[in-house]
Image (cartoon, coloured by chain):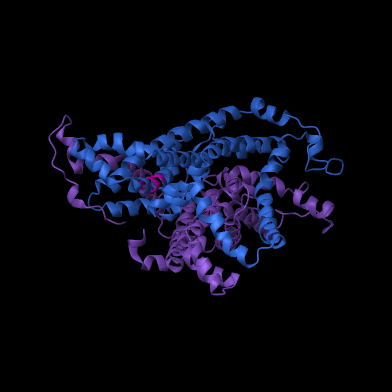
Chain colours: A purple, B blue
């Protein structure tokens, strides 16, 4: 971002050494260094992005090159209740899970910011849900949500005696949605907590001391010192979290595969189901492409909405 | 910003925050009981909830079947007669060892490819400072924001066309799309923290640019390389959707995909083997993570802060 290094020192005249002139020419070096990255990203990221948009306007199926059919895919999706259920659930899932993750994550970060024994160890094990492959921990959740042998039901019924029947966590639409959101929050808390903890640690303790001398309450300290100073890192973490929750795939695919009655399909799982097992690549691409506007809006909202403060300060605070 | 990456070591953290932040609270209201209720109780709840699925995974994977499905007779939280039967079945009756090796190979290859490309790109952007370097950096950051779930369909058609379908190469080549942006961004941060004067000295001494990169910058950026490497490795290990879409034959699958598609068969789930498989599949990343936890945390927070 910032170009603070004195540029006049960059081109030091130098006695010609053993190495060929070619490797001394900057344009050549830049091209050489950027080649692998640019090549990989252009071929496997930029091109497919464009190709995906093109595919969404065709009726391509697996094994058969499609033809341009205009907006037909989008029109049929527009009249498809399953698609709208998926759109609704994707937004609902993102919104509820993000709020849950950030509230609980912030709380955990503030707990970890105290002086507690074994802090480094606790911080390390708390990250486990984040680093373990999502599919594998999702399978564990699937087992926890088992209708017959759910350990949660067991605790509720046989240990705490709160309820007298076993819950069917994944059997009805709303129960399944709630269960998925809980699993997603569980997975997301560590990331939020650890990044916000890093942000909390940059806040100077003297600010809190000053506030204490001025007679600020705990809530005032939180509201007037912690929150504003956390905003820059919060906005980045929020953007990433919303983006990856919105485009989530693994968790839902592993636990419910969109069921019961297609009620827990995210846009990503629906796109997969239509495109790969259903072999309607064009239609799947159309669903995937419809995620793009949502992603852009969500990113801009998070980044500029929450992180405006940092943005206005310009790049000087890098 | 740059310093954040460097100074987030545990010692600094402990000194900088823990104690000093506590002081004002000690002054005001810090009784032992209150501290217990506001800190230790919620913290223990967090730890229990965050770790319980792993405990449950571990307990289930060593339970014999008759115990697993009889909560009346056996307390489900404990194992009465632990057995390795589930793990034995997994290792000898399925292709599990094969899946582990495949995943390891793909993750290693994708990691090397990504770190290699990222080092060169980050060096070019941060140190060669060509015209438009900032825009290239921004473009790479934006690439990080493109989720794989909107890319896998077009990528699947490309993989077909290139004849890479069902080949590990399809994954090795596509994983860098989400690894390179992250690693590049991380390494730019590290390169920024290395004093430019060192390179100037080397330039004056007659070193070429590549010599500087190889002899001066890279050795100093080793922590950054390790961070980028372990992050790339865990991300490739955890990747799911590409591996699900591009690989078909049983023996070429990666662990997460294989467990979900090969071990889940029929209506009766073999929970013991499933849990054993999930546990073993998590172990490699957990081991790597436990060795490099500080690098991991600092790269995670450092990259977010960038």
Instruction: Give the side of residue B196 with respect to residue B106, left or right.
Output: left
Instruction: Give the side of residue A84 with respect to residue A176, left or right.
Output: left
Q: Residue sitting at 48 percent across and 56 percent down?
A: A240
Q: Is residue B255 visible?
A: yes
Which of B74 and A218 lies nearest the eye of the viewer?
A218
Q: Is residue A227 visible?
A: no
Kindly give the residue lying farthest to the right in the view shown.
B73
| Magenta part, dominant SS | helix
Which of A281 and B139 lies nearest the eye of the viewer?
B139
Q: In this rendering, is residue A192 above or below A22?
A: below
Q: In this rendering, is residue A174 above or below B181?
A: below
Q: Quadrant of the C terminus of chain B?
A: bottom left
Question: Is A150 included in the stretch rendered in magenta?
Answer: no
Q: Quadrant of the N terminus of chain B?
A: bottom left
**Horizontal and vertical percent position of residue B106:** 47, 33
Q: Which stretch appears magenta?
A: B183-188
Please identify the quarter of the rendering in which residue A23 is found. Answer: top left
Q: Residue sitting at 30 percent across and 57 percent down?
A: A2
**Horizontal and vertical percent position of residue A11:** 16, 45
**Horizontal and vertical percent position of residue A217:** 59, 72
């Amino acid at each position: 971002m910032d170009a603070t290094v004195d540029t006049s020192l960059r081109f030091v005249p130098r006695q010609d050494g053993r190495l060929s002139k070619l490797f001394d020419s900057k344009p050549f070096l830049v091209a050489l260094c950027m080649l692998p990255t640019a090549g990989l990203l252009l071929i496997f990221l930029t091109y497919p992005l464009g190709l995906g948009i093109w595919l969404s306007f065709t009726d391509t199926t697996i094994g058969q090159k499609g033809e341009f059919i205009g907006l037909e895919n989008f029109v049929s999706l527009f009249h498809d209740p399953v698609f709208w259920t998926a759109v609704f659930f994707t937004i609902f899932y993102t919104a509820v899970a993000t709020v849950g993750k950030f509230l609980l994550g912030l709380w955990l970060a503030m707990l970890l910011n105290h002086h507690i024994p074994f802090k480094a160890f606790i911080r390390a094990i708390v990250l486990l849900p984040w680093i373990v492959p999502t599919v594998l921990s999702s399978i564990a959740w699937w087992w926890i949500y088992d209708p017959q042998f759910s350990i949660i039901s067991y605790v509720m019924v046989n240990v705490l005696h709160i309820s007298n029947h076993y819950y069917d966590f994944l059997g009805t639409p709303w129960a399944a949605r709630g269960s998925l959101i809980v699993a997603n929050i569980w997975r997301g808390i560590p990331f939020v907590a650890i990044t916000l903890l890093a942000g909390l640690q940059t806040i100077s303790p003297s600010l809190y001391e000053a506030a204490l001398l001025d007679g600020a309450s705990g809530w005032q300290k939180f509201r007037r010192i912690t929150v504003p100073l956390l905003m820059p890192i919060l906005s980045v973490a929020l953007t990433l979290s919303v983006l990856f929750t919105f485009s989530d795939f693994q968790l839902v695919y592993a636990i419910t595969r969109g069921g019961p009655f297609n009620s827990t399909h995210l846009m990503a799982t629906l796109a997969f189901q239509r495109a790969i097992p259903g072999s309607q690549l064009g239609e799947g691409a159309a669903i995937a492409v419809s995620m793009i506007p949502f992603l852009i809006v969500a990113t801009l909202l998070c980044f500029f909405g929450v992180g405006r403060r940092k943005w206005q300060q310009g790049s000087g605070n890098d | 910003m740059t310093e954040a990456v460097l100074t987030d070591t545990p010692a600094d953290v402990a000194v900088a925050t823990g104690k000093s932040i506590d002081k004002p609270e000690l002054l005001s209201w810090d009784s032992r009981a209150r501290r217990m209720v506001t800190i230790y109780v919620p913290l223990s709840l967090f730890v229990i909830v965050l770790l319980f699925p792993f405990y449950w995974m571990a307990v289930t994977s060593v339970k014999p079947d008759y115990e697993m499905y009889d909560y009346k007779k056996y307390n489900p939280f404990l194992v009465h007669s632990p057995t390795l039967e589930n793990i034995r079945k997994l290792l000898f009756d399925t292709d599990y060892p094969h899946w582990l090796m495949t995943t390891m190979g793909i993750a290693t290859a994708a990691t090397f490819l990504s770190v290699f490309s990222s080092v060169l790109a980050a060096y070019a952007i941060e140190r060669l400072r060509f015209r438009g370097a900032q825009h290239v950096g921004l473009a790479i950051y934006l690439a990080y924001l493109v989720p794989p779930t909107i890319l896998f369909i077009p990528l699947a058609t490309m993989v077909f066309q290139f004849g890479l379908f069902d080949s590990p190469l399809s994954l090795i080549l596509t994983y860098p799309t989400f690894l390179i942006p992250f690693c590049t961004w991380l390494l730019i941060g590290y390169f920024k923290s290395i004093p430019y004067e060192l390179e100037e000295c080397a330039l004056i001494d007659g070193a070429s640019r590549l010599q500087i990169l190889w002899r001066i910058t890279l050795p100093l950026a080793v922590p950054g390389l390790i961070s980028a490497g372990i992050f790339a490795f865990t991300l490739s290990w955890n990747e799911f959707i590409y591996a699900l879409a591009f690989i078909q034959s049983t023996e070429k699958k990666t662990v997460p995909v294989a467990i979900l598609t090969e071990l889940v068969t029929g209506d009766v789930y073999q929970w013991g083997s499933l849990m054993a498989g999930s546990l073993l599949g998590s172990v490699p990343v957990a081991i790597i993570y436990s060795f490099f936890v500080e690098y991991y945390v600092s790269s995670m927070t450092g990259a977010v802060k960038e």
